[in-house]
Amino acid sequence: LKCIASLNGDPAVHGFIVQLPLDSDKPINTEKITNAVAPEKDVDGLSSINAGKLSRGDLGDCFIPCTPKGCMELIRQTGIQVAGKRAVVVGRSKIVGAPMHDLLLWNHATVTTCHSKTSTLAEEVGKADILVVAAGKAEMVKGEWIKPGAIVIDCGINHVPDSTKASGKRVVGDVAYNTAKEKASYITPVPGGVGPMTVAMLMQSTVESAQRFLEKFQPGKWNIQYNKLTLKTPVPSDIEISQSCMPKPIDQVGKEVGLLPDEVELYGQTKAKVHLSALKRLKNQPDGKYIVVTGITPTPLGEGKSTTTVGLVQALGAHLHQNAFACVRQPSQGPTFGIKGGAAGGGYCQVVPMEEFNLHLTGDIHAITAANNLVAAAVDARIFHELTQTDQALYNRLVPSVNGVRKFSDIQIRRLQKLGINKTDPTSLTMQEVNLFVRLDIDPGTITWQRVLDTNDRFLRKITIGQSPTEKGFSRTAQFDITVSSEIMAVLALSDGLDDMKKRLGRMVVASSKRGEPVTADDLGVTGALAVLMKDAIKPNLMQTLEGTPVFVHAGPFANIAHGNSSVLADKIALKLVGKEGFVVTEAGFGADIGMEKFFNIKCRYSGLRPHVVVLVATVRALKMHGGGPAVTAGVPLPKEYTEENLQLLAKGCSNLNKQIQNARMFGVPVVVAVNAFKTDTKAELALVVQLAKEAGAFDAVECTHWAEGGKGAVALAQAVQRASQAPSNFRFLYNVELPVIEKIRLIAQQIYGASDIELLPEAQEKVALYTEQGFGNLPICMAKTHLSLSHDPEQKGAPTGFILPIRDIRASVGAGFLYPLVGTMSTMPGLPTRPCFYDIDLDPVSGEVHGLF
């Protein structure tokens, strides 16, 4: 059944048969097997669906079993008209007799079916103008029964004794050939009659299947069903819209975009994992167009990047009929229950079901939590055991004797090689080598690895661990971060396969030894276990938009201390699936100065992918805030500056838009500005933003209404993106990784942020020296800076210049593959507000519906 499912889904296979009888020592349900074959590939015509269509007379929409089809072809070859003739079929098997009856009937013969229990068999046979015999009994039909001039088709294959043959037997049909041929006008011999024609008809059906496929198939185009939106005014809540939509079964979405059944691992009806084998299968396919959605510097008023990402894909797919795939990050549950809410988009541009998207999805974040905390536990346990045991006691426990045999594990062999000890026999190590092997000698003050939880909990920002008497006085100050800030999340997002992920996990630095050497997950011996915990999380999650376009939801690293982009693997698989003329739209976190810069300098550097277009999202009201508009307070009506026309304030705020356009163009990629319109925006305000964007160097600038209209409201944006994707793109990185760490930081600060220079505080200077000495100086830079301003000061809106950017500290995510300088204080564990979102979230115990998510 697994083999059949694979063949059903393979577009390169147009027909196949199951050879009957099935050869097995154990009983197999033949009906179940034959019905598993997709009707459109069932060239043997044995499935119940094809049999049903034949019995109903739908001859042009089914496959006819090959033997009856061959019999009809032989009858046609005689030149005799079937219509109006009396036909008799002897035999009623599902393979020959029953379908032969139906086929003759729908070719307008008058048909009688006989069988071994027919009492007047000779009489009925004598009436036949056309006689088809498939009874399975040697020479059952006698020549004298046959009507003179009848056409006789003998489908039987039987063996009778014959001493003249070397085998002692010969093959005969169900008709006594020698006497029958004297009366029949045409008769098929056995062997050499129906058998070869059956094979020929099988080939013909396979060709017909390929022809039917090609009639529907458009090269490079998906055969996809889109969902039509029923728009309402005013626009309902996000969860109301999501729950009013009837998503397609997710296995159907997988099939529509060209995934094979065994590449899609279902998690219910609306979400699935996609196996990495799909990327291997599609490796020779050309990539589609690669689009990144970013935004102006964020404000509390919101810009709508996620909504625009989804709206653009809905427009490209459901309205312009292009292959289009969205690749987005998986949100943390912390903000979902905290203050921000979910991240599935909004209005009529959402990933659905939004409650699945915003909550557990397929458990990737839980896997990261488990893996991260295993490392944290391993760090403290190792320090504890080294403090309380001698070298020999440690060695005996790390390399125990099992049934009198001591053996290093693979990961222990790697540690020995790292130490320059090329030995594999545990008994051959010297005392000095044993000491080096068992003592990681972690300096507790250098531990950078924290425990994580996917919940906003301010009281875990600083904790004391090890207070139980069993820890013998070993305690230290530690903290919890939110799970999405874990380096393992960044590793997941940047890995290009299982092997690469495993290597990155092993390289993660958790602390330094008292000798100043980096201590890695590999040194702790935990790499293999981490890979096991992450083996399913590495598979991208397949979902869909409200309009039925496909979405990969995979990975969700922080956009400040990490790079803020969805996974490399999701993008790579999607680019293969859409084909050369298709589009993959992904989103970069925060503004273009943060998420987009990291997308280019980190993600594209590691993936080798080259973007075609930047979509820069802006709103009139957010630009007004950058122009000096007043602060806003949650739950309080917006000041009139944001609800009434104010062209002067808007023009001033467009300095931020101008700078972010320049930032994108610095990488050599065309920029399309998406002006996400609100009902309070005036025509003059929208026109001003479009005009100033074009003057700043945007390829195009387009007003969008997708939040209220779905893909229809982003068609103009999609058309602009199509045009821009044909324009020359001369993509380049901002810096060479071989440059000194300080120079790479300075380039980002001056070129992207507008700073005049940088200032490294003493701790940061020490880290530059340490990481350079440890061999990490050639890693890309991932700036951890406020997202609320181009500068380090969140209060400075617009496009500030001439400031000195202070670098407080520098940390290393060696496994993920970057250094992250800290500009100011970065919170990695959000807190809950006075009134969290969870007050509004509830479950209907009768329907099972979730209420209150947004």
Image (tube, grey):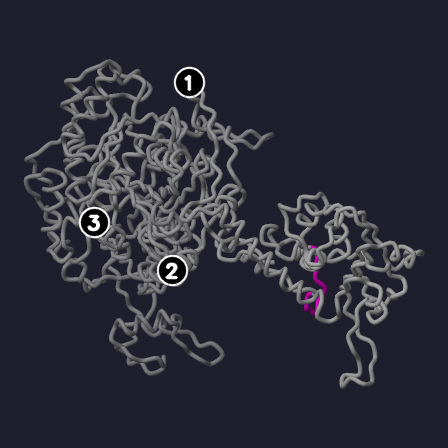
The residue carrying mark 1 is: 234
202 with respect to 581 (left or right) = right
305 w.r.t. 521: above or below: above
Q: Nearer the viewer, residue 477 or 132?
A: 132
814 with respect to 57 (left or right) = left
109 with respect to 205 (left or right) = right
Residue 798 visible in this rendered orientation of the protein? yes
Q: Residue furthest right?
A: 119
Marks 2/1 in contact by CB < 8 Å: the verdict is: no
- Residue 207 placement (x, y as % from top left): 55, 57
What segment is highlighted magenta in the picture? 22-31
Element type at marker 2?
Answer: helix
Residue 480 visible in this rendered orientation of the protein? no
Q: Amino acid at mark 3?
A: Asn
249 with respect to 94 (left or right) = left
- Residue 266 placement (x, y as % from top left): 52, 48
Query: Which is more N-terminal, label 3 or label 2?
Result: 2
Marks 3 and 1 sit apart, C-alpha to C-alpha, by: 42 Å
* Res 143 → quadrant: bottom right
- Residue at figure coordinates x 28%, y 21% from the top left: 633
Element type at marker 3?
Answer: helix
- Residue at figure coordinates x 38%, y 24% from the top left: 708
Q: Amino acid at mark 2?
A: Leu
Q: Is residue 324 magenta-colored?
A: no
The residue carrying mark 2 is: 498
The residue carrying pointer 2 sits among few (fewer than 14), some (14 to 19) or many (20 or more) residues within 10 Å by Cα, namely some
The residue carrying mark 3 is: 601
Q: In the rendered view of the protein, which quadrant contains the C terminus?
A: top left
